[in-house]
Amino acid sequence: MGTVLQEQDSRESGFSSGVEEALGDLIWDAREGLLALSVGIGLGVVHELMELEIEEVVGPKGKHDPERVAVRHGHENGEVTLGGRRVPVRRPRARTVDGEQEVRLGSYAQFASRDPLSRVILEQLLAGVSTRRLRRTREPVGERVTHEERSVSKSAVSRAFVSRTRDQLKALMSRDLSDVRIAVLMIDGIALKGRTNVVALGISTEGDKLALGLWEGSTENATVAQSLLSDLVDRGLDTEQGVLVVIDGAKALRKAVRTVFGEHTPVQRCVRHKERNVLDHLPDEDRQIVQRRLRAAWGQVTHTSAIRKLTLLADELAHTHPSASQSLREGLEETVTVTRLGARGDLKRTLQSTNPCESMIECIRRTAGNVKRWRNGDMALRWTAAGMLEAEQNFKRIQGHADLAELAVRVERETAHNLTTDEPPIPHNHPINTATLTTT
């Protein structure tokens, strides 16, 4: 009768009686699927590794060793990290022969580390999973493990995320910039429901993008921007060799660049922001033609022709739409800085606007999309830093990077020229990239 019942149980479980006997206690995990079985086996291996290390430290049981340096000290409850959760285990202990201190077991420390847990939590929250739903996204690892798991509550997840993002913020704001040659510095601000963070993106002479830092304030004001730029200099950003600064045109950012870097630093104002500012002063029926003329002017090969076309357009608008004309004239010269420096083709299109920095900011907005209430400045800084580093993982070299080194040389020469004379910089007659020249 017993044999018949065993065969019936085997048919219901899907395993033969021989397989069930071989699995032993793991049969219940096996019935829940391969992953649960693997987890059960894995936890068994963890126990074996810890016991093996204890034996290596204190020697085998039942054999006296007069030279041993540690003794067994029983077992106690512990926890290991498993797939974004904490799972209880019984861990062996050892103490020094004199009983003064605990002997650290490397195997337990490895599996008990919370870094994998906080890393999983960070990745999932930045991917848009809310703290309330995080538990539902984890893969099933067996009923026994799920029943005993910890660190899966909303508050525990939140604490782990705060800790991880605080570490990321610290790492970002302590980066040593003395070993990287930054050719281009882009600065922009991101508004987070009442709070504003000014962020900085660097582009090396090889064309690689790098998140440099951020600063928090109530608005995108000059004080906040100056604090950010001063911090970059303190961390080793070399401006004496010359750096091209690209900004959206905000007066506060322009003032900060002038205060920290000096008047000699070349500044490129984003043409996309300037275009929007000008068009906002025009009626709908005039916007398309003015937009075409603006883009035609900024597309000119030479600095002189670009200035001439922009000035002519500003003169014409002065009669019909004086506000648009005034907006265009403000900082007009700095909208063609990269043209004056000889940049052409892909490199010119890349550096004419803050689009590379805007892409990083868009990643920040996307990762912080689930945040409903910004409690304080620390929270805004942590989320912004996490978004910047998340974007950095997908950074690619900018288009036109092959010509960036020569542009950096020209910026360096112009910076040195501006430091020794009050005369305006002379436009470069020879373009950097002659292969992609276009005329309009």
Image (cartoon, rainbow, N blue to C red):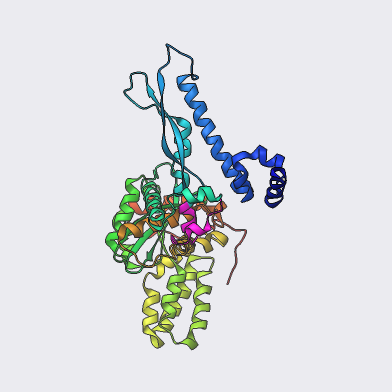
Q: Quadrant of residue 114?
A: top left
Q: Position of residue 420 (x, y in %)?
A: 33, 51
Q: Position of residue 95 (x, y in %)?
A: 38, 24
Against 57, residue 30 (above or below) is below
Q: Is residue 58 visible?
A: yes
Q: Position of residue 30 (x, y in %)?
A: 63, 46
Tell me the magenta residue range. 121-141
Against 405, residue 133 (above or below) is below
Does the magenta-highlighted stretch encompass residue 122? yes
The residue under the point 49% across, 23% down is: 55
Against 392, residue 220 (above or below) is below
The residue under the point 50% across, 70% down is: 298
Of the pair 255 and 73, the residue shown nearer to us: 73
* Residue reaching furthest to the front: 1
Does the magenta-highlighted stretch encompass residue 416? no
Q: Quadrant of residue 94?
A: top left
The residue under the point 57% across, 51% down is: 402
